[in-house]
Image (cartoon, rainbow, N blue to C red):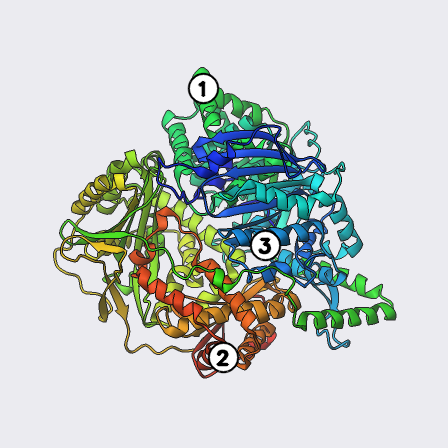
Amino acid sequence: MWRCGGRRVREALQRLRGCSTQHRVWRGMSNPACERALQYKVGEKIHGFTVNQVTSIPELFLTAVKLSHDNTGARYLHLAREDTNNVFSVQFRTTPMDSTGVPHVLEHTVLCGSQKYPCRDPFFKMLNRSLSTFMNAFTASDFTQYPFSTQNHKDFQNLLSVYLDATFFPCLRELDFWQEGWRLEHEDPSDPQTPLIFKGVVFNEMKGAFTDNERIFSQHLQNKILPDHTYSVISGGDPLCIPELTWEQLKQFHATHYHPSNARFFTYGNFQLEQHLRQIHEEALSKFQKIEPNTAVPAQKHWDKPREFQITCGPHSLAANTSKQTMVSVSFLLPDITDTFEAFTLSLLSSLLVAGPNSPFYKALIESGLGTDFSPDVGYNGNTREAYFSVGLQGIAEKDIQKVRDLVDSTFDEVVEKGFEDDQIEALLHKIEIQMKHQSTSFGRALISYVASCWNHDGDPVELLQLGNQLTKFRQCLKENPKFLQEKVKQYFMNNQHKLTLSMKPDDKYYEKQTQIETEKLKQKVDSLSPEDKQQIYEKGLELRSQQSKPQDASCLPALKVSDIEPSMPFTSLDVALTAGEIPVQYCAQPTNGLVYFRAFSSLNTLPEELRPYVPLFCSVLTKLGCGTLNYRELAQQLELKTGDMTVSPHVLPDESNPDTYEQGVLFSSFCLNRNLPDMMHLWSEIFNNPSFEEDEHFKVLVKMTAQELSNGIPDSGHFYATLRASRTLTPAGDLQETFSGMNQVRLMKRIAEMTDIKPILRKFPRIKKHVLNCDNMRCSVNATPQQMSQAEKEVEKFIRSLGRSKKERKPVRPHVVEKPAHSGSGERAHGNGSQIIRKLITDPTFKPCQIKTHFQLPFPVYYVGECIRTVPYVHPDHASLRILARVMTAKFLHTEIREKGGAYGGGAKLNYNGIFTFYSYRDPNSIETLQSFEKAIDWAKSGKFTEQDIDEAKLSVFSAVDAPVAPSDKGMDHFLLGLSDEMKQTHREQLFAVSHDKLVAVSNEYLGIGKSTHGLAILGPEIAKIAKDPSWIIR
């Protein structure tokens, strides 16, 4: 997987946001992993390593141990923390000097087989032989990283063995290079009369990646602001340069970059460090001697005057205004990221400059009306050796480029003159405090991401993690010098000649020109071939196809057994009480680390049909328009000072037992420090009772940003939009899901953003408010520590009592409403009169599923394909079999057909909770052929051509998702939202264990065959001649 610049503000601390761990111990109890790590002594020798540093980092509840390997100089960082979700990563500094994508192709190819595990594709095979909670590999601009995480000790050792062998001792076979990188091959490999074309997984992945205009801009920005060394090239590969890469160059790059002397090892969690060190030393490092890797990135030479560039991209057919599709940004080179405190200061300064409606650049640029949103990669970017800051606008007219540049300069002048308000700085520091306390399940991986770039350039990762020290120093600097931040602005932005102005405008013929260049490159390659070369290519193509089609013996790979899976799941204790007389509130006591999590769910059953399409926009802007006496700027300030976040989102919740029944509503979510709970609940009261729908100018700004984000997101989420459309007519809920989240919503937002008078949309919101912002059909939930619960009960009751109720009962718009109690199990206790959550579900007894096939024509060079089939929901005994079947089909058939043979970046099958069985492909050079592969997959499943081993592997893969760790903030949410009890989940668990070969063949025949169940199809991508002539397809 290739990583390029981001879409939003790249603050260093943002990577930790939402990524703290599930802290497994109640606050105040011991932390054995940390205490054990504190016993290590500097200078101590352990399995070929020497301990260099042992540091307690109490603000993150961890102990850091830094080591180095004696023979090779490999560096090692262990973060001991009482977290069962243990993480490993090995990272190499990879510094390519051309855009052939050599580190990216290598990242793919090393995972295709190694000395100890010579079978094809051990990486994908381990996904089904493991209970991993995460497995992947990433190519960044200057490093390549191989992380995994798991809660199972034996699994950790298995995965570690495979990862070590893959990275240090890969086979790097030529056919694997052909498959993963690029190759010349006949369109139909079995017919030498068909034309030769470019194929390859990375080749197609990068063609897909550069359909995203934001990514094109981000890539050029990095290339042009750091032009002297590795950052001037595309590490992932330019599709027009990838065909220049040779197999020999790939092997040479591995030899020079994938050496322990150029490696950084990282482990995290509560497993013992000694076992990791022994295995890494014995299986890999003991076989190497130290070398000088010569991979360091030199400092960029500073410019003596600013530079300007203009580039082009493809037009955006779903952008709101076709005449305003230009982007421009002004960027500045900043100091080396290994200067930890300076980097910390500049990332905070960046947030103050661009984050939220109170920031100077939001006021100056976003509210200028010139564009739709900030330019890509806005803010601080610390992913390269020297950081850079960027700010600008997208969605502007080309004639306004100079206006944006002038606004950037004048805003810096104003900041130097006026500085920042104390409340703005306090709000930002509060955000950091709450991010350090907020607990999720991927903290270990977030830490790797946080330290990767700095450590890659020999910075100190431990110093980087000592956020408490940096905050103290930051406060001290502000105290000693009130103009501390203004002086930084002057130093790095006003007096900095290393300043880049980059603009990008659409070219109607952009994709045509790209295709033409690719065609010419292909012609040059083909014209230079002798008849013998062509014959060899044909034979190699047949050999590759034969290898891909052969059954693989994966017996060399380590594997867990189904018996390693826990037979029963831990149950969560819940209390449900009626508050203020009739509103059910679910309380879940959890070790939340001093935070309180509040949610409310409000039904949409009485909302008139014509208002439904506007619910997502209503939700998106509700907490951004002001409320009560607060205008939108004051509300934004209060949210930052008093909460971690307050979000509102529409939800369509399926029923666990009937595919024609669903619940529709709006979910309100927030969290805060214990001390701020009264303030947070007061803010919710004001938002519910007195929302402001008067700020039409700011509303216009929010609409443009929302429309821009939706249209920009399509290239990354095309498969999501395809499958949502394909399932639209299979259940009564499908149409509403498409309305809220599908291409219909993207197109509606485009139309609204194009309106000259937006007031008619704003006038709909008070009508929506009447139906949603009351407690007529509401339920609430609280996750907090036991000590915090009594205060939480009081504050929630106060909130509910503050809400309005309808004077007369409103009737549901759809007459068929089913009242269904949430299933309570042994873990759930009701207070008082057997109080429980009652869900009001919509059902449509007259609904008939029907097949619709839709092709959204978009100017992309790749396709996103979805096919959906209506089957049976969660509690049906066959649901478990279909869930396992989806995994068997993905691992044993679709991966080979769609990725290996077809060259798509991804594809497979999955079963949704509501019983929609989904086939999909992602960044796929094929469309109709992929739909044919889905049909073949069904025939393959019906024929039962899979083994007991295949079924066991699919069970392991499914259980790794079923047993994925759940954060304290999310415990009990299945019960609160879906009405699922732990007993029901345990029953489903037992049904998964009981899935057999016979059951899989039976459900394949019962549900998947043509004529058995209703299918829906959808494709996003360029024109397809065959479909254009087929009247059964709708072309959009």
* Vertical placement of residue 14 versus 317, above or below: above
| The quarter of the displayed image where residue 616 is located | bottom left
**Image coordinates for residue 998, horizontal then vertical, percent:** 48, 79
Amino acid at circle 2: Val
Query: Which amino acid type corresponds to the residue marked 1 in the rendered image?
Result: Gln
Indicate which label's residue lies in the foreground, 3 or 1: 3
Give the Cα separation between the discs numbered 2 and 1. Answer: 68 Å
Q: Nearer the viewer, residue 493 or 144?
A: 144
Query: In the rendering, at what x and y percent does residue 718 appear?
Result: 52, 61
Residue 158 numbered mark, or none: 3
Q: Position of residue 90 (x, y in %)?
A: 62, 45
The residue sitting at 55% across, 70% down in the picture is: 950
> Could one spot residue 543 in this view of the protein?
yes
Q: CA distance from mark 3 to mark 1?
A: 48 Å
Q: Secondary structure at mark 1?
A: helix
Residue plotted at (54% across, 54% down): 155
Residue occupying the far top of the picture: 480
Residue 920 visible in image: no
Q: Reading the chain from its start, which is encountered first: label 3 or label 1?
A: 3
Looking at the rendered structure, the secondary structure element under dot 3 is helix
Q: Which mark is residue 788?
A: none
Crowdedness near tag 3: few (<14), some (14–19) or many (≥20) residues, C-alpha within 10 Å: some
Q: Which mark is residue 1001?
A: 2
Labelled disc at residue 476: 1
Q: Nearer the viewer, residue 100 or 488?
A: 100
Decide which of tag 2 and tag 1 comes sooner along the chain.
1
